[in-house]
Image: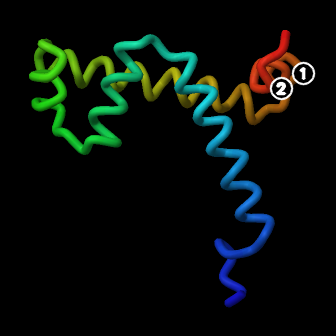
Amino acid sequence: MSGAPDETPFFFCLRSEMKELLTQAISELAEKEQRVLSLYYYEELTMREVGEVLGIGESRVSQIHTLSMIRLRTRLTTLLAGTPKARASAAGTS
């Protein structure tokens, strides 16, 4: 281990937990929002190309993307706050 902060066991654990929380938050988005994020970030399409795939305009893709990011940020903030309800939701229980 080189001692770099991003290579410590703590960092690996933290990154893993963040991935789980992000996966949870994304799964709670509307299907169209999930699709826009998937095409844009995973398929690396431009917003114009995403619009062509979905049959909507580039400006609408931008609106959906922005709304999705706001929703993700809000949900992740809630999950990271560690409230009992948020933890139960992240664990898949009520």
The circle on residue 27 is: none
Q: Is residue 52 above or below residue 76?
A: above
CB contact under 8 Å: marks 2 and 1: yes
Q: How is the image coloured?
A: rainbow
Q: Is residue 71 above or below residue 94?
A: below
Helix, strand or loop for disc 2 = helix
Task: Give neighbour class at mark 1: few <14, some 14-19, many 20+ (Cα, 10 Å).
Answer: few
Q: How many marks?
A: 2
Q: Is residue 43 left or right of residue 24?
A: left
Q: Is residue 91 left or right of residue 29?
A: right
Question: What residue lies at 71% left-to-right and 63% top-to-bottom?
Answer: 12
Question: What residue lies at 41% left-to-right and 22% top-to-bottom?
Answer: 34
Kind of residue at disc 2: Arg
Question: What residue lies at 63% left-to-right and 24% top-to-bottom?
Answer: 75
Quarter of the figure with the N terminus: bottom right
In three-dimensional space, the C-alpha distance between marks 2 and 1, rounded to whole angstroms, equals 5 Å
Kind of residue at disc 1: Pro
The circle on residue 84 is: 1
Quarter of the figure with the C terminus: top right
Looking at the image, the residue that sits furthest to the bottom is 2
Residue 50 quadrant: top left
Residue 6 quadrant: bottom right
Question: Which residue is disc 2 drawn over?
Answer: 87
Q: Is residue 36 left or right of residue 70?
A: left
Task: Give neighbour class at mark 2: few <14, some 14-19, many 20+ (Cα, 10 Å).
Answer: some
Residue 30 quadrant: top left
Helix, strand or loop for disc 1 = helix
